[in-house]
Image (spheres, helix red, strand yellow):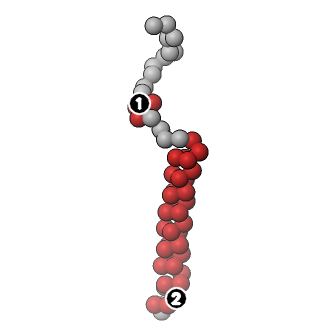
Amino acid sequence: MTDKVIAQEFVIPTALAIALAAVLSTGAIYCINNYLGPIDQGEASKITIGPIDPRP
């Protein structure tokens, strides 16, 4: 196989896949931050076992 065929079959699709993944992940982070709001670190790291008791 010539170098041109190798580039057309492997390098170009790989580069396009990487670029698409970067665009989609950036868009997902943008949408999450703008439409769902930032995640509180306190809520993200809070682990509860069993039911939450509402009494003080």
Of 52 and 27, nearer the camera is 27
- Residue pictured at 51% horizontal, 11% vertical: 54
Say which mark, if any, is on residue 55. none
Q: Is mark 2 on a helix, strand or loop?
A: helix
Residue 2 in the image: above or below residue 10: below
Q: What element carries label 1?
A: helix
Of 19 and 3, nearer the camera is 19
Q: Earlier in the sequence, mark 2 or mark 1?
A: 2
Image spot of residue 51 (x, y percent): 51, 15
| Mark 2 and mark 1: Cα distance apart in space | 53 Å
- What type is the residue that disc 1 sits on? Gly
- Residue pictured at 49% horizontal, 63% vertical: 22
Image spot of residue 1 (x, y percent): 49, 90
Crowding around mark 1 (Cα neighbors within 10 Å: few <14, some 14 to 19, many 20+) is: few
- What type is the residue that disc 2 sits on? Val
Q: Mark 1 points at which residue?
A: 42
Image spot of residue 46 (x, y percent): 42, 27
Q: Which of marks 2 and 1 is in front?
A: 1
Q: Name the residue under label 2.
A: 5
Of 38 and 22, nearer the camera is 38
Crowding around mark 2 (Cα neighbors within 10 Å: few <14, some 14 to 19, many 20+) is: few
Image spot of residue 18 (x, y percent): 49, 67
Q: Residue furthest right?
A: 35
| Quadrant containing the C terminus in the rendered view | top left
Q: Which residue lies furthest to the bottom in this view?
A: 2
